[in-house]
Image: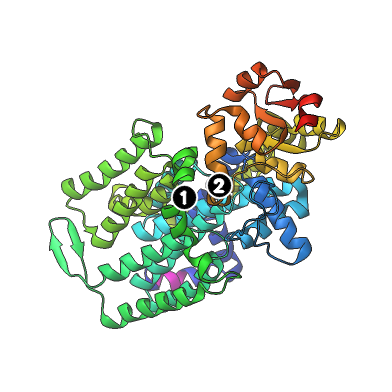
Amino acid sequence: MSSASLVADRRANPAPIRALKRIFSFPVMLAGLLVVLAVLTVRSRLDDPDMWWHLKTGEIIWTTHAIPTTDLFSYTTSHHAYIPHEWLAQVFIYGAYRVGGYQGLMLWLCLSTSCLLIAGYALCSLYSGNAKVGFLGALIIWFFATIGLAIRPQMIGYLLLIVELLLIHMGRTHSARWFFALPLLFAVWVNCHGSFFLGLILGAIVLFSSFFHFHMGSLVSLRWDPRRRSMLALALMLSIAALFLNPIGIEQILYPLNTMLHLPIGLSSVEEWQPLHITSARGIALLGVLGCIFLLGMIRSSDLHWHDLMLLILGTWLAASHERMLFVFGILAAPILSRLLATSWEGYDPEHDSPWANAVFLAASLSICFWAFPSRQEMANQLDQQSPVKAVEFMKSHHLSGHMLNEYIFGGYLIWAAPEEPVFVDGRGDVFEWTGVLEEYGNWATLKTDPTVLLDKYRIDFCLLTMQSPMVRVLRLLHDWNLVYSDNTSVIFMRTAKTSASN
C-alpha cells in the first residue's frame, strides 16, 4: 500500500476500525485455520511414553525448589549422576498439569503446537513476502512435525529454532539489532532442550556464508556488509556465553554432543532415532520437497541462496540419519521452498480483504477447536489404551513389591503413577547406557542371552511387560514364574514364593 493510500485509509477509518481490520485480516484467519489443524492433530496424543518422567521431574523441581542431578527413579543405576538438561521445559509441563490436570497438559500441547505452526507461518511469509505461500510453508512444517508432536520439551526447542530463524532473517534483511535478541533466546533454550546446539550450528552456517560473494547459475551468495556481519558474530559470541546460564555448567552445554557421539545403543535401538525409511510417506515427501526446490531453481532460474543450500543439506542429513529429525527438516526446508514459490500465487492485498468473512471463519475455527478438544473420558481412554493403567491398579491393590522388571516404554508411566516402585529402565536412555543397564535389558528383551541370568542378577520379583513382548512366551515356559495379571495392554509375571524365598 502506498503512503498516499495509507494516509487516505487513516482519514477514512479511525484507529479502532483499523485495529479490527488487522485482527480480522486474511493472514489472521489463516493462522486460525492452523490452530484448528493443530488441535485436530494432537487431540489423541496425550499419552507419550517420555511425557511421564518429564512430568515427574517437573513436579520434583516445583515442590522441592531444587534440580535433581542424580537418578531418583530407578534401582538399577545406583543413583548415577544425571544431567537435567531439560529442567525448565519440565517445569513448564508440570505447571500445565498443576493448573488443569490432564486437560491442562492437553491444552499445553494444543497451544505449543499452534504457536509452532503460527511461528512457522510467520517465518515462511516473511521469507516469501506472500502470506498465501507462507501458509503452504506452514503446512509443510506441520506435515513433517507430525513425527514428533507430543508433550515433551522438544516442542519448546523446535519453537525456539523457528524464532532463531526469524531473528536471523530480520537481522539480515532489516535491522541488525535483531541479532542481539539471540543471547536471550539461547539463555532460555539451553535449559529447555538440547536442540540449542543445532541452533548454534545454524547461526555459524549463516555467519560463514556471509563472507562469500558469487553467482553460479541459480546458486547465489551475497557478501554482507562488514558491520552487519560483525554484529551477528558478536551476537553469536554472546549467545555462547549465555549458554553458561544453566545449573550444571559446561556438562549441560556439551550434553547434545555427548549424546550423539557416546550413546550408540540408544541411537541404534530406539525407534525414533532410526534412519529414515525413504519409501515411507514422509521419506517420499522429503524427496518431493527437495525435488521441488531444485526444479524451481532450474526451471524458473530462481535464486537459491548459499546459506539456504547449506541449511537444506544439514536438515536432509539429519532427517536421513534419524527419523525424528524430520521435524527439523520441515522447519529448515519450508521457508526455502516458500521463497521459491513466492510468485506462483497472487499475494495478499489488504485493500481486497473481507473482515466480516474472516471473522466468520475465525469464529468457526474457535468453535471447531472447542468441539475437538478431548473430554476427560476421552483422555482417560487414551491412557488405558497405551499405558499400563489397570496393571498399576492391580499392583497397588495386591500390594506387589520388590524388584520390578518393566518394559522400556512403561518406565515413564510407572515413574509417575507408581513412584513408590523404582523402575528397572525408562526413556532416559542415557543414564541407563552409561551404567550398562540398557545393553543388559536389550539383550534380555530380544532373547540374545539366557533370560534367567538377568532375572537372577537383579533379584527380580515380578515383571510388567507389554502383551506383545517376546519375553511373555518365554516366562510362560519358566517353571518358577506365574502369570498373575493380563489385559489388552500389559501382563504381569511373578516369581513363585518358593523361588523368591530361595533367592
The type of residue carrying mark 1 is Leu
Classify residue 121 by image quadrant: bottom left
- The colour scheme used here is rainbow
The residue drawn where x is 61% and y is 34% is 454
The residue drawn where x is 29% and y is 47% is 344
The numbered dot on residue 263 is: 1
Q: Label 2: state its secondary structure.
A: helix
Observer-nearest of 478 and 174: 478
Between discs 2 and 1, the one toward the N terminus: 1
The residue drawn where x is 66% and y is 43% is 412
Evaluate whether residue 501 shows in this view.
yes
Q: How many marks?
A: 2
The type of residue carrying mark 2 is Gly
Image-based side of 86 in relation to 346, left or right: right
Classify residue 285 by image quadrant: top left
Evaluate whether residue 11 shows in this view.
no
* Image location (x, y in percent) of residue 440: 55, 39
Image-based side of 501 in relation to 330, left or right: right
Q: Label 1: state its secondary structure.
A: loop
User: Circle 2 is placed at which residue position?
Assistant: 429
* 3D distance between C-alphas at marks 2 and 1: 8 Å
Label 1 near label 2: C-beta < 8 Å? yes
Which range of residues does the magenta coloring cover?
Answer: 4-8
Observer-nearest of 113 and 398: 398
The quadrant of the picture occupied by the C terminus is top right
* Image location (x, y in percent) of residue 332: 37, 54
Q: Is residue 337 above or below residue 19?
A: above
Magenta stretch encompasses residue 6: yes
The numbered dot on residue 143 is: none
The quadrant of the picture occupied by the N terminus is bottom left
Crowd around label 2: few <14 · some 14–19 · many ≥20 (10 Å)? some
Magenta stretch encompasses residue 430: no
